[in-house]
Structures are given as C-alpha cells and as structure tokens.
Amino acid sequence: MDAIKVKNLPCTESVAIVIFGITGDLSHRKLIPALYENAKSNHLPQPFYIIGFARRPWDDQKMREVLSQAIRDFARTQPVDEKVLNQLVERTHYIESAFQDRAGYTQLSKLLSDLGIKNTLFYLATPPSEYADIVEKIGQSDLEFCPGGWRRIVVEKPFGHDLKSAQLLDESLHAVFHENQIYRMDHYLGKETVQNILAFRFGNGIFEPLWNRNNIDHIQITMAESEGVGTRAGYYDRAGVVRDVFQNHLLQLLSLTAMEAPAVFSAKAVRDEKVKVLNSISDIKGKSAIKNTFRAQYVSGTINGERVPSYRDEANVDPGSITETFMAARLFVNNWRWAGVPFYLRSGKRLPKRVTEIAIQFTQIPLTLFDQPNLAGDAPNVLVLHIQPDEGITLFLGAKVPGGAMHIEPVEMRFSYAETFGDSHPDAYERLLLDCLQGDATLFNRSDEVMEAWRLTQGIIDAWESQGLENLPVYEAGTQGPHGADDFIMRHNRRWRKIK
Ligand code: BG6
C-alpha cells in the first residue's frame, strides 16, 4: 500500500476544513486529534484552516480552547507537542449558526473569501437528519464550486436509514455536488489491517490460486464488541446491528475479501470491483432472508467481571424493544470464483471481547492418511486476518507432535503487526482525512456501492419486519452469543470460531 504522502496539493495554497457539528463527540474524539497527528507529521497542506460551524454560542476563542483540550485528551501520540497544537488551533474560526440558516452560510462564504481560501473540504459531522439541509444551503450559497480550487464533501455514516432514505440523501447530494466531490465515509476502510486485505491478496502470488471455490469451504467474518450501546441508544434502538454495521462495515469486509484484482490501483478500478461483488450477492429477502439470517438481543450478564444490564434496561431503550444487538447472515456471491461458498457474517454487542476478523476456512483434505478422522481436526487449515485487536495474520496447520505415535495437532504460523512494525499506526481518520484532502476516493464508498449494500440490507429488514416478532431470541452478555446462532451455522455442518 502507498505510504501516506501529500500528492496533489500545492503546499502553498490555503486549504480549509469546514466541520459542521464541530461541537460534537466525533469532532473531539476523532477529527481534531486526527488533524493534529497529520499536522505533527507534516502532512497537512499549509496554511491549513479549521472552520467550525454549529449552533452552540461559542466564539473563536472558545473553540480554540475546546479543540486544544480535545487534542490533549485524545491525540494518539502523547505527550502532545504544544507547538504543533498551537499552530493548528491558531488558524481556527467559529461560525455560530443553525444549519438551516442562510445567514451562517453567507458568513462562511465571506470568511473563506477574506482568508483567500479556494480549496475547501466540508465535513458533515452532525446528526444525519441535518445532512440534506446543509447540502442544500451550501448549494444555495454557491459554496460547492470555486474557480481555480476544489470543493469536496465528506458524509459520515449512517448514509440513510433504509434504501429509500439513502436514495433521497444521494439525490440531495447530487443536486449540488458531482459524484467525484462526494466522500462517503466508512471508517473501517481507513483501518490499516483492512487495507492490508488488498495488499495481502494482491501483493502476494501464493494465495490467489487458492482463493476460490475449489479450495475454500467457507468464510467467516466476525465483528464482535464487548461494549453495549453506551450513550447512543436513541440512534441504536432505531438502527440495530443490521443498519449499524452489517450494511456498511461487514459488507465492506466481504467485498474486499471476495473482489477480483482491479486492473490498476485507482479509486474507479477498486470500487468497480467491489461493487461487482455486491451485485453478485443473491437477493436475500422474504423467506430466504429469514432462513439465511439469525438475530438476537442481549440480556444481562458479566463481562470482564462486571455485571452489565440487559439491552432493554439500557438508558433510552424502549423496554419492549425488539431491536437486534446480534445478527448472523449467510450470503452467497454468485460468480465463478465463489459459487457455492457460503460467507457467514456475524456481529454483536456485549460479546466477550472486541474482535474483528476474517477467517478463510480451507477445504478438508481429500483422504486421511494417518487415521480416521483427520487427527488435525475436521478443519485444519484456516487463514485468519485479524483486523483488530492483535492485528496480524495467522495460518493454522496440522503438525506432528514429537514422539512415537502419529499425533497431529493444530499449530499456528503468525505474522503480528506490532512485532514487525511496532504498535503505533495511524488511526483510520488520519488516513481518510488525508485521502480526501488529496482527492483520493479509493477508500470511500461510491454511490452505487452504498445503494447495492442497502438493496441487500433492505431485503433483510423487510423480511424481519413482516415476521412481526414480539420477542427476539436472547443471549447472555459476555457469552459467545445466542445458541440459535450456533444452530444456524451447524445446520450446514460448520462451527463459528471462538471469540477470544
Ligand atoms: C460504528 C458503529 O460504525 O463502528 C458502532 O456505529 C461500533 O456501533 C463502531 O461500535 C465500531 O468501530 P471500531 O472501529 O471500534 O471497530
């Protein structure tokens, strides 16, 4: 993968990032610390301005104080370099305005022109309900275009609540911006280990001949979290796992695992290949969606020695909620490479550990030489891409245990990121912010990709809604998940990998 470098930006031209909703959590925890890290490693174009736009009655001074604190609290590299921090925050400005108020945008336009800024990145870090209004006002104020410079917009997830609202949001965006100005964020694509899926697959020759239906029995993609819904229940109770992570992170991981090699490493070629994967996934709706998915909700249990409440008892969750906090799905990519190979996807809150991994389960040997059945286990060869934590790759093999008898045990060959490269690598937002400043959309979702992902997700949502359940299966927090999910995969003689 390319090292991060500022490619297209003349470093002498001013650039501004305008953050709508700068007073919120995303800005403080992610965006501002990421900009600081980029400034510290000299990757930001100069001069670089941060313009905050939000409703709170702040002024420039107040914003500088809050941003400085955010950097001190959340910067990845500590202790903070005060000189870099001061240089970054001294070029910040705040516009106090409602998102619907034209006057705020007029003020923004004047500020950009007073500062002589042509290149501007708009960042939507507000609740999604504000997106369409902001985009419309940007258009009405002619801010989407600047002769001799560039204007781009970053849209955070969730991109819509369902297929219809995603289409409407897309229409609002396209009414003002060209597709090549729009950067739809999925922070999973900024993770080093997610990008490494491509490097691993297309930078090495030895795996490609095995990477298909002839040698792979099935693929398991797991995104487990030990956290509950925290303070986000208002959003989560309307979303569930299916909207929160299946529609985006899980389907992205699947696309990268299953895609063909792009002809070149360009945004168009990579995204063309990813979207082909989503196009090839058979429609999953109605009875087929019910048969090929499983959902459940957590009840109280113990995680890391701490008692945690049931989902229905969390603050701001409807006590009769049937929102799923766990889901599993079985999908098929209907092309020549993958026909007949199931992709099992699962994700849940309040599982024992935060683990994201992709496990490629190779087929069993054709005949056992050593005994019956294969002493190395019924599934000896698994290649696991550890996305987080303990980032790395493990290949499981059967090996003879020293001694007189032919005992075979599973052993591991492991590559660890931390051991090889050290354990401090850029956060996803550091990488993704630089990419949009540089105009590289490879790691952002294109319109057709998002719509395809929603097409699949909508089929599942509709099927679940028409099921009219009053209660969902449950699982105890801190356990491996619902028993029903084990039965779900066992039906086809497979087992989930343990979350550990
Ligand atoms: C977000 C989801 O997109 O991803 C959260 O909305 C989830 O519910 C988070 O916790 C997980 O991200 P990460 O980077 O911690 O794996």
Image (tube, rainbow, N blue to C red):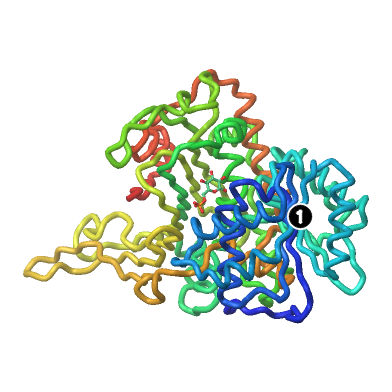
* Pointer 1 local density, CA inside 10 Å: few below 14, some 14–19, many at least 20: some
**Res. 236 image quadrant:** top right
335 relative to 324, above or below: below
What x and y, as percent, mark residue 439?
74, 70
What x and y, as percent, mark residue 280?
66, 54
Q: Which residue is mark 1?
A: 447
352 relative to 392, above or below: above
In the image, what residue occupies the spot 54% across and 62% down? 257
Residue kind at label 1, given as amino acid type: Ser
In the image, what residue occupies the spot 74% across and 54% down? 94
In the image, what residue occupies the spot 53% across and 37% down? 293
Q: Is residue 220 left or right of residue 13?
A: left
**Disc 1 secondary structure class:** helix
Q: Nearer the viewer, residue 222 or 410?
A: 222
42 relative to 111, above or below: below
Total numbered circles: 1
Q: Is residue 198 left or right of residue 156?
A: left
What x and y, as percent, mark residue 171?
85, 47
Does the rendering let one see residue 173?
yes
147 relative to 466, above or below: below
